[in-house]
Image: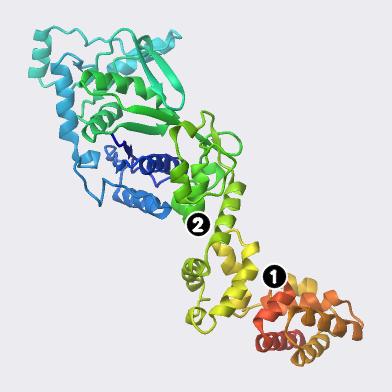
Amino acid sequence: MAPRVRFAPSPTGYLHVGGARTALFNWLFARRHGGVMVLRIEDTDVERSSDEMVTGILDGLRWLGIDWDEGPEVGGGHGPYFQSERLDRYRATAERLVAEGHAYYCYCTPEQLNQKREQAQARGEGWTYDRACRDLPDEEIARREGERQPRAIRFKVPDGQTEFTDLVRGRIVFDHANLEDFVVLRSDSHPTYHLSVVVDDVDMAITHVVRGEDHISNTPKQVLLYGALGQPTPAFAHVPLILGPDKKRLSKRHGATSVMEYERIGYLPEAMFNFLALLGWSPGDDRELMTRDELVAAFSLEGISGGNAVFNPEKLDWFNHQHLLRLSDDELLDRLEPRLAAAGLWQHTFRGAERAWFFKVVDQLRPRCKKLPEFVEQGRPFFGEPDAYDPDAVAKRLGEPGLADHMRALAAAYAGCAFDEATLEQVLRQVAESRGVKAGVLIHATRIAMTGRMVSPGLFEMLSLLGKDRVERRIERLVTFLEEK
């Protein structure tokens, strides 16, 4: 049977890196085996869930290129796909567990439970629920029900052990002595995670549960619930956590954790996809740079590592640069247009009369740019006029006596020469020598004239691409500035 997997985020925050990697592993597994990817929104935490966060999660998945076969905005035969629309189903299942002897009503109040816990702590002991309500007589239960006393529903954990075979970690065994009778339905009639996730996975015919290893401790409770409901247990694969460079769990202190923040910063979705796929998984060979199709063809749960994965921002930058180099001219143009437009640097002629020139500029920038905004920043001298001179550059590089005259002489020499890189450099050095100044004086001043800054792409490559008219105009502007300074 083709596998059915699910990604089930809680909309209490945007799609973060760890969640995106889990979604990606599920997607790769489904696509590799011709299966179905279900997207389910676990929004029972009403106070913290929001439509904005749901939209953020969907946007993050779409940006990465992770689509779903069933779920929000797609539909399917196993809905609804929002847990908030499935509450009656959870309540009915909890009552069924009680009726069939697998669960019981617990009338213990939060105050009573806290008091017992504090007393145990005062004795230096750990505390688990003492099953005070497990064996209440029928008449006592009837009395309390008649009085409509608030009550939760707890699962009866039997004696013995629960074991399952994890597709990443192998055989795992839990002793029931370490499991308390856990709540499946709270006193406010809202389900706990254990009940809702099992009911959903049963109703949605999930065959494989691929999720973070922090859920391993939840698994024995869920295995018990599957058994109590007379349902087969899906296969479990618990994937390693993602750590920051300091080997602590990835968090905001390590930088951006929201997937869409990486889009804003200027990473390519295909680079992020490739990078995330290799966080805790290997194709079994030395390949790193892989397309989506190559990743699908190579993916297997057996390739997931049991060890934690380290999020290395420098490695992500490398992936992004490599994928940038792989983009065709048209693909790169499509990515750059909105960013250049937002910076006020876009010209419609870049797709028309100046297309060839535009790509000559881009080809000069590609080796230097690891992210899309760097094309905008480093391309600014080509696509727009410098609006001011950096004060530090002025103070450090424009103090040479007679510099205005030197630059005027350079402009005159450039007016009559070929505008290729070698000639431009040769002419500048000749002018410097003839006027008794170091070539660096004119190089620095010319760079500031072209860009307004001390740092730029290669100067003579830039001059050649800017062309004679632009270069002459910018040198004249600098000369005017120097004479008025």
Where 338 sits versus 245, above or below? below
Image coordinates of residue 219 in percent, x first then y, are 36, 23
At x 38% / y 43%, what residue is drawn?
Answer: 27
Question: Residue 9: which quarter of the image?
Answer: top left
Whether residue 321 is visible? yes
At x 44% / y 44%, what residue is drawn?
Answer: 297
Question: Residue 190: which quarter of the image?
Answer: top left
Residue type, numbered disc 1: Ser
Where 157 sits versus 190, above or below? above
Question: Is 130 in front, or is 225?
Answer: 225
Q: Which numbered circle lies on residue 189?
A: none
Query: Is there a contact, CB below 8 Å, between mark 2 and mark 1?
Result: no
Density class for disc 2 (Cα within 10 Å; few <14, some 14-19, many ≥20) is many
- What's the CA distance linking mark 2 and mark 1? 24 Å
The quadrant of the picture occupied by the N terminus is top left
At x 36% / y 40%, what residue is drawn?
Answer: 33
Which SS class for mark 2? loop
At x 61% / y 75%, what residue is drawn?
Answer: 360
Residue type, numbered disc 2: Leu
Q: Is residue 138 left or right of residue 73?
A: left
Q: Is residue 375 left or right of residue 62?
A: right
Number of callouts: 2
Image coordinates of residue 236 in percent, x first then y, are 37, 27
Residue tagged 2: 268
Image coordinates of residue 338 in percent, x first then y, are 46, 69
